[in-house]
Amino acid sequence: MTVPLQGVTRPTFWQIGPVGKAVFYYLAAVALLVFLYGVYERITRYSRASEDPFERLDDLPARVFTGARLALTNAKQFDRDIIAGVMHTFVFWGFLTLVIGTTILGIDMDLYRPLTGDSFFVGDFYLSYSLVMDAMGLLFVVGVGVALWRRYGRRMDRLHDRHTGREDDYFLGALFLLGVGGYLTESVRILGTSATRDVSFETVSFVGWAGKEWLATAGVTPEMATAAYPFVWWSHSLLALAFVAWIPYAKPFHMLSSFANVVTRDEKAGVRLPGVPEDASPDEIGPSDIDDFSWKQLLDHDACTKCGRCSSACPAKASGRPLDPRNVILDLKQYRQKRDAGGEPVDIVADGGTSVIDARTMESCMACMACMDACPVEIDHLTQFTEMNRRLTESGQMDEHVQDAMMNVFQQGNTFGDPGRKRPDWTEELDFEVPDAREQPVDYLWYVGDYPSYDDRNQEIATALARVFEAADVSYGILYEDEQTDGNDVRRVGEEGLYEMLVKDNTAAIQDCEFDQIVCTDPHSFNTFKHEYPEFEACKWSEDDAAHYTQVVAHLVNSGQLTVPDTLEYTVTYHDPCHLGRYNGEFDAPRDLIDATGVDRHEMPRNRADSFCCGGGGGGLWMDFDEEPKPSEERLREALEDTDAGAAVDRFVVACPMCMTMYEDGRKTGGYEDALDIVGVTELLAEALETAGTVANT
């Protein structure tokens, strides 16, 4: 017998009765009020924090749309962990569908029916609804099951640390019980109602129907299912309501805070850092109390899901330094909770065991931004780490080796401590004169940088680039002794005052020159000239006026102004510098130049945005860490053992002077001196040009 169209539906509040229905609505209202109060408390807590220096709520509709797109596509969830991406997609879309489905049912019962006396929850709509809900609910259960397996079966290291606790167990357990409980409720209802009506149309609910068949096979009769249904229904409903009420008070809050964090993210977080107010006293520079963090940074703490992706990507942690980015964020959150509960205040960061964060932990950061790139919820780790380094600087707790480098910068304008007059000495090795940009207009103002100016090995990078510019017959020039340290890493170790002094001095020297574009040898210089200097009033150039040399030379090649012969026969791999790749998204220009020389280029497993830091950033170049292995040694091992197609690499190509220094050191300490050579992109280009007689061998 065919079921009438109006009969193709499910009974709501079956076996519950009017009193039970009233109790449910009362409990639902209570759960919602508890939820709303918890959200209100969170928001008011953020309001007690410091103002954020960047505009976070401008063009809010567009931000919400972008945040929703990122959340719905789960794009960042797939980065570095495909299984986690699929798992989270199943959980997210399954949960979202179940929430929407419950909302639709509520609209039908509580709005549409009372207003129209009819129901849209019948016929084809009901069948489509049931199919979608069962399918997406199954994905939800599978996703949660995979999460349980990864945490408790496979027991992935990054999912277990000192911040892992019962709330993590309760959260995953509640999700799993909600998913399975929903199907059990459905199966019991289908079996129970089969005693009084034809339920053949319920096969569209394929999971619930399978459960009903299993129950029947196990000996459960329709009468038994009818008797058990109220208990099953109330168990599922009470768990669902309790979960809703619990959301703002524990780990489930990340479902809201993560989305809010994505919406309020700063696209340049870490790439540019906030300044210090001019009227700030030394005690006000860097966080001394938890409320010295901005509201966005407190939101960062709440958005953390403890997934450990930042920890897995962190080269400092991998090399044994005392830094775990996740633990820093969660330690700050835990301290805030203790303070809000009446706990005693302690220093946020200090050299000793009584602070929330130990000084050595912050000094370990390489400012590579791998943690931020890996984070699926857009936590701004580096901004907070830098501000804590500022506190250490202002309180006189800076690493002694960094202090020496900063004193050199203050006294001589460079980290080597050599006289400024020696900065252009490297040009004497050339058989042509490098133009002086202070004396004549140029197209390209070449900011050479400290290491290419003073370090013997990196001077070879500078001379090679000068030869390339000469071969291209471009208009270029340098600042000679008027150039000073760019300050990118000076700022990231916490010396904001010294950084601002460098900005003032460098912009004064550059403003007197006539040029079209600033070209930087060092990606660190490129980053700060492009993104940070323009934030200062003294700077008259824009972001578009700064470039890395690989971008400029690639443009010269593409425009036909420079022809690079493909005559080299090396097998090489290329290392993406953090400040060029991850910071600024430039991955192709250096590769295009390398390929133009004719070499056989192979990729390491960690490349492009997933590249592994050399260890020199964030002041690491000046510090002394007892590391095993050094980041540079690990990277060279990867180049020799793990490149694609098992290539036997004989050249390790870099596009950053700091990387050159760190890898030359790692080649010695790691025992790789006879295995491969470290070469710069400029050196490959100059060698290729030399083979064609385009440049002289100097």
Image: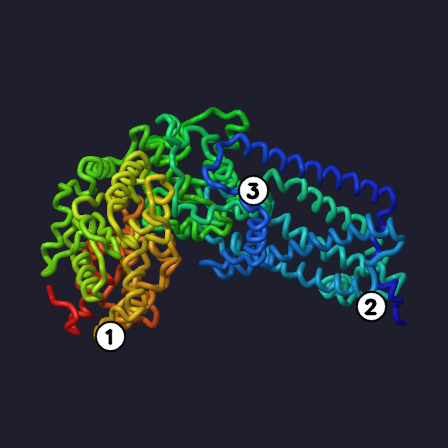
Q: Are marks 2 and 3 in contact (CB under 8 Å)?
A: no
Label 2 neighbour load within 10 Å: few <14, some 14-19, many 20+? some
How packed mark 1 is, by other alpha carbons closer than 10 Å (few <14, some 14-19, many 20 or more), is: some
Q: Position of residue 104 (x, y in %)?
A: 75, 54
Secondary structure of the residue carrying numbered label 2: helix
Residue 302's x, y, as percent?
53, 41
The residue beneath circle 1 is: 566
The kind of secondary structure element at disc 1 is loop
Residue 124 drawn above or below residue 632? below
Question: Identity of the amino acid at label 1?
Answer: Asp
Q: Please state which amino acid type lies under the numbered disc 3.
A: Arg
Name the image quarter holding the C terminus: bottom left
Looking at the image, which is closer to me, 2 or 588?
588
What residue sits 47% from the left and 24% below the top? 344
Q: How far, Cα to Cα, is label 2 from label 3? A: 43 Å
Query: 461 or 253: which is nearer to us?
Result: 461
Dots 1, 3 in contact, CB < 8 A = no
- State the image coordinates of residue 402 (x, y, percent, origin top left): 25, 38
Picture coordinates of residue 413 (x, y %)?
20, 40
